[in-house]
Amino acid sequence: MPKNKIAVEPLFDPDMTASGLLYIPDQAKERCDQGLVKYIGKGCEDEFEIGDHVLFSGYAGTLVRLQGEGLLIILSKRFVTAKIAKQESLDVEGLYFIDRDGEYFPASYEQATALMARALETVTPIRPSNKSWTAKRDGSKLTEEDYEDEDE
């Protein structure tokens, strides 16, 4: 790589929405503005490491296709607007998972959001009814007759 340049493997927007129901055409996508550093020039070795996640202007750099490498964006280091710091997983205080043996372990933010996303994709929504069913004080459920008696 030239002295003050880096080669970035672009991270493009997905082709489908998160639900998988809508296709996003190329014309509607934003220009690629983030990627992973793959090669580093000698003048950038102190600032970047291979694998760093970087943000840059979608109009910066030169897009090249190398045989065996795929698409790369060659950027001057001055066009990198941010480097996303690598973080350990963030444990959420007070949120725990329980395994099959009954052992508790802390849940990370990433684990919790992944589980919630998977649950939202697989669960069919419950349609609300016009009646709300509650329990009587003795623990038995209310019936339609009980509701009719309350209206009178």
Image (spheres, rainbow, N blue to C red):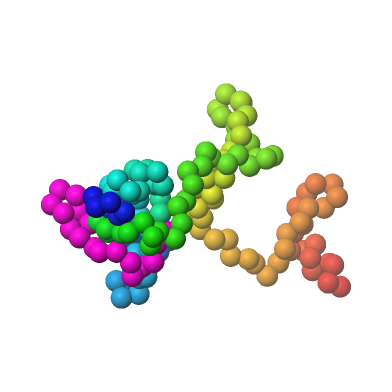
Quarter holding residue 4 = bottom left
Q: Is residue 1 left or right of residue 33?
A: left
Q: Is residue 152 left or right of residue 84?
A: right
Q: Is residue 99 left or right of residue 50?
A: right
Q: Which residue extends farthest bottom? A: 27
Name which residue lies at 47% across and 43% down.
86
Quarter holding residue 104 = top right
Q: Which residue occupies the foreground of this view, 122 or 28?
A: 28
Q: Which residue extends farthest top? A: 101
Name which residue lies at 55% across and 27% down.
100
Name which residue lies at 28% across and 51% down.
3
Name which residue lies at 79% across and 68% down.
148
**What quarter of the picture does the C terminus occupy?**
bottom right
Q: Where residue 5 sits: x, y (%)?
A: 30, 54
Q: Which residue occupies the foreground of this view, 143 or 113?
A: 113
Q: Which residue occupies the foreground of this view, 102 or 10?
A: 10
Q: Where residue 109 sits: x, y (%)?
A: 57, 45
Q: Does 132 sit above or below residue 54?
A: below
Range drawn in magenta? 55-71
Q: Where residue 105 sits: x, y (%)?
A: 60, 30
Q: Is residue 59 magenta?
A: yes
Number of marks in the rendered image = 0
Q: Where residue 11 sits: x, y (%)?
A: 34, 57
Residue 61 visible, this angle:
yes
Q: Does 96 sit above or below residue 66?
A: above
Residue 115 visible, this angle:
no
Quarter holding residue 33 = bottom left
Q: Does 18 sit above or below residue 49?
A: below
Q: Is residue 25 magenta?
A: no
